[in-house]
Amino acid sequence: MKPEEKQRNIELAEALLKEQALGVAMVSGVITMILGSGIYAVAALVVGGDSVSVLVIAIGAAIGLSMQYLGRGITTDFTVVASLIAALSYPVAKFFTIALYTVKLDRIPVTDLFNSGRMVSLVNWVLSGLGLVDLIFWLGAIIAAAFLAKRRLSIDEGQAIRTYERR
């Protein structure tokens, strides 16, 4: 590789690395998780039961995509953070679902959910209700988020990053 081509690749790689925004990606991932979990809870209430568990994979994919497009990430940090947020998405979705059922069935205001006795019961219910199928969809959500969190590089961009790492 010629020195001027190597320098051009290094400059391109530095520009790609500078435009990454892990903080923005994290915020977008968390917001996507909360919104997706809310949609999951409403769908579970409307459809009834666990037949909406496949939506968890869609939540994981949405987390990965939001982090990819808003964070512009190309490093492994984005994959790790997306996986962690996606790992939280299923318990949060289940928690929202159980909270929504509790509010509907007990006809209580949402604020009453936050007393310590009810909160402990809700958390225990979330953890006790995870079955094998739930774990499979949960794993699917984590894989989808991890796969989609980093943006794809063109051949030239990939070569620039490799040149930058080898210098």
Image (cartoon, helix red, strand yellow):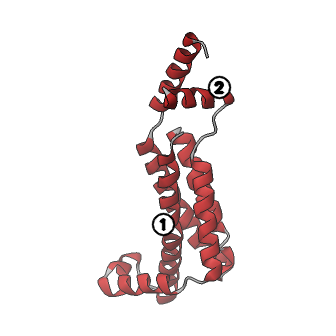
**Percent position (x, y) of residue 161?**
55, 30
**Percent position (x, y) of residue 112?**
36, 81
Number of the label disc, if any, that sits on residue 88: 1
Of residues 6 and 70, the one nearer the viewer is 6
**Residue shown at the point (56%, 54%) measured from the top left:** 63
Q: Is residue 78 above or below residue 43?
A: above
**Residue shown at the point (58%, 65%) measured from the top left:** 39
Question: Marks 2 and 1, Cα distance to the nearest angstrom?
Answer: 36 Å
Q: What's the residue type where badge 1 is placed?
A: Leu
Secondary structure of residue under mark 1: helix
Q: What's the residue type where badge 2 is placed?
A: Asp
**Residue shown at the point (54%, 85%) measured from the top left:** 129
How many marks are shown on the rendered structure?
2
Number of the label disc, if any, that sits on residue 156: 2
Which quarter of the rendering shows the N terminus? top right
Q: Is residue 24 above or below residue 135?
A: above
Secondary structure of residue under mark 2: helix
Q: Is 69 placed left or right of 155 in the picture?
A: left
**Percent position (x, y) of residue 164?**
51, 27
Number of the label disc, if any, that sits on residue 80: none
Q: Which of pointers 2 and 1 indicates the residue nearer the eye? A: 2
Of residues 79 and 64, the one nearer the viewer is 79
**Percent position (x, y) of residue 6?**
55, 17
Q: Is residue 62 above or below residue 20?
A: below
Q: Is residue 167 above or below residue 135?
A: above
